[in-house]
DNA sequence: TATGAATGAGGATTCATTCAT
DNA sequence: CATGAATGAATCCTCATTCAT
């Protein structure tokens, strides 16, 4: 389907070149169509990249929801580790989508701002909800030192942010090493005893 | 001096809008001159933003070198804390420069690529050198658990990356809270006892 | 067809004003379109004027080939005369194309250099080939004094160059008078007795 | 003297690049001054190139007058030959000035038109005057076939035009060969017997 | 003389977009 | 669906020129 191919190429070029340099013309060329044909599927550039962004978020959500569902009977340590790991794996397996996501998440052109901020907040809330459950359980079951849950969530999100950034920066091998080191130190910092 | 004002406005607009939207025309307008006047001082857009980038790096280096110099007789914990803190403070005190720096460091237009990558590596080496000294001392003096120095450096840089990202994301208050939490957990993870 | 109209206007303005003053804007205006529309047909200014130049050469070639073909059973004198005459007539009948051709042939902007030089050499070879045949026959049949063929060709091309220059300089009447005088003297110089 | 150096560089760049590409900025750079300094000596670009052109003409006049003066007691053949030869030698010895002269003489930007056309006509009259004398004498003394003097002058000027063009086209060696051949044929065409 | 600073005018080019077909 | 043609707006950049110093 042409509509999807356009979206994929748009995502790819967004990752490579950023929003302004991902020209409709260059997208069309790579898809193998002429520029105006894009307008048969999308209202304009903004509309196209909103679709790209929504797909990007959906993709992530789906993946993480799935990975969480597979973890019902695990320890808190396993769940948290799996959570960071899954996010990493997801991004590692789809570097293009990650790069595209970063472009949009960090340096969104102002036109897209409002819509994106909305979905962005949804994502934060989604994580917050899940982490709230996990950390509450972790403290109740004595796996984690008693400390304000707000703080635990904040610090975990900070860990994920750090890892996300490194994901973007370093090649896979270097990243994986750092990932494990950071995780151990993080867990040592929060676990009981 | 007009030349500097141009550079400052360029930096500001880079932070706000990114490279492509920081038009020479809009820069000129904000400076209060006409577009072609910019060419009396810079060879072109690329040249201008390279100057911006070099200033940005110089500024950071200078600041960090200074803060390191003021720390000669501190404990390892103090030094590491101060290091993250100083970087945070620097970026917090110059949010504009930070945003501009991120734009260039992460999503550099390919024209600027080579020169920037060079200076970027220099920065990495600079940090590496300093951390090598600190962690070696930390282990020798028994402040830090004996573990591979390479790993310690890697994990510290990861911490800084995470904090750097949050710096960009959250407002000052929220950031500062997270900063302390993350730092504590990090230190608990590496310190002896 | 707009594409051809653009080429024609470009040729006209090239003749009148030269390469740099034949602005895409002024060409577009004369065609009755807006400047960017030109890019729907040509990759850029250089591309457009290369097309103009190729047309110019094709036109000349076609004309001369045709005129040579119509001359199979003529005397050598008739053929040579017809050759200069045809070139003159061609240029006289299309003064615009001639002027444009001169602009490109003599004072080509360096960008166009390589391609043009190639086609230019082709033209030289084309004339050389034809003249070689004519002069060989001229000497064998005793119409022309026995002398090195290379020299005859060189001197004939020199005559054509001179006439070409005058063509550009003088008005039609003055030119035609000079043409006949020069031809007679030239022929007297090479014919047998 | 800076004023002269500017003029010389302007002439050189005119020869190399033509009027529009011979930028005041590039001239200034080559001279070793800054662009506005040119205005200390010339009213503007047009003024500068008018000066260049006048120098060019003066130079030629001077040279030819001199060469004519040295020829008082020669035969008509010698005089005519010397005349073409001198013009050729002049241009061969100053190829830069020749190229510059051609740029101005043929494809003058319209601004310069009027002034240049005036001096150009002066030059024609100058030659006409001299040739009138020579050919009259040539016929009276029986060196040249009796024929209308107007025609002889016209045909001689045509010869010179042709040679001038070739001068520009070919390298020195090739040109010199052609020159002699053309001259012989020309003289054979006009001389008595 | 010489120049640093500034500029109006204009040039090629790119881009998102429209519209008739 | 797809596209050829066209365009308004904007972009970077160049140039001749001016003017205060």
Image (cartoon, coloured by chain):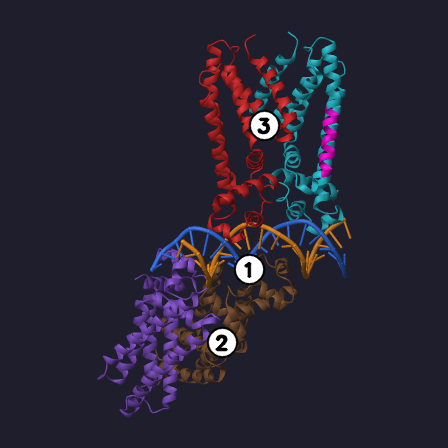
Chain colours: A purple, B brown, C red, D cyan, E orange, F blue
Q: Residue at x 48, y 79 (%)?
A: B85
Work out how far the residue at label 1 is from the one at label 2, CA to CA, in angstroms: 29 Å
Chain bearing tag 1 is: B
Q: Is residue D118 a member of the stretch shown in magenta?
A: yes
Residues packed near mark 3 inside 10 Å, few (<14), some (14 to 19) or many (20 plus) = many
Q: Residue at x 46, y 66 (%)?
A: B105
Percent of width and height locating residue B102 = 47, 70
Instruction: Assign a secondary structure to mark 2.
Output: helix
Name the foreground residue: B110 vs A8.
A8
Say yes or no: labels 1 and 2 on the same chain: yes
Residue A193 appears in the figure: no
Question: Quarter of the image holding residue C177?
Answer: top right
Chain bearing tag 2 is: B
Q: Is residue B46 left or right of residue A91?
A: right
Work out how far the residue at label 3 is from the one at label 1, CA to CA, in angstroms: 48 Å
Q: Which residue is mark 1?
A: B45
- Magenta stretch: give its range: D114-127
Q: Is residue D149 left or right of residue A97?
A: right
The circle on residue C164 is 3
Work out how far the residue at label 3 is from the one at label 2, CA to CA, in angstroms: 76 Å
Q: Tell me the quadrant of the picture where the N terminus of chain A can be found.
A: bottom left
The circle on residue B87 is 2
Name the foreground residue: D5 vs B154.
D5
Name the foreground residue: C158 vs B77.
C158
Nearer the camera: disc 3 or disc 2? 3
Q: Is residue D15 left or right of residue B169?
A: right
Chain-order first, disc 1 or disc 2: 1
Instruction: Assign a secondary structure to mark 3.
Output: helix
Residue B36 appears in the figure: yes
Find out whether the residues at labels 3 and 1 contact each other: C-beta distance under 8 Å.
no
Chain bearing tag 3 is: C
């Amino acid at each position: 389907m042409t509509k999807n191919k356009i979206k994929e190429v748009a995502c790819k070029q967004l990752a490579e070149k950023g929003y302004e340099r991902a020209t409709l013309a260059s997208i069309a060329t790579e898809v193998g169509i002429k520029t105006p044909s894009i307008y048969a599927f999308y209202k304009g550039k903004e509309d196209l990249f909103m679709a790209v962004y929504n797909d990007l978020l959906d993709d992530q959500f789906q993946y993480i929801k799935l990975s969480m569902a597979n973890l019902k009977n695990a320890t808190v340590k396993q769940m948290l580790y799996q959570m960071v790991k899954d996010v990493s794996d997801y991004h590692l397996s789809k570097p293009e989508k990650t790069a595209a996501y970063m472009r949009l998440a960090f340096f969104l052109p102002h036109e897209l701002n409002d819509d994106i901020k909305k979905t962005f907040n949804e994502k934060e809330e989604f994580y917050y909800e899940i982490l709230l459950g996990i950390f509450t359980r972790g403290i109740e079951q004595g796996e984690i030192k008693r400390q304000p849950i707000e703080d635990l969530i904040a610090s975990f999100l900070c860990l994920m942010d750090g890892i996300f950034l490194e994901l973007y920066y370093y090649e896979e091998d270097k990243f994986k090493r750092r990932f494990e080191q950071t995780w151990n130190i993080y867990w040592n910092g929060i676990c009981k005893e």
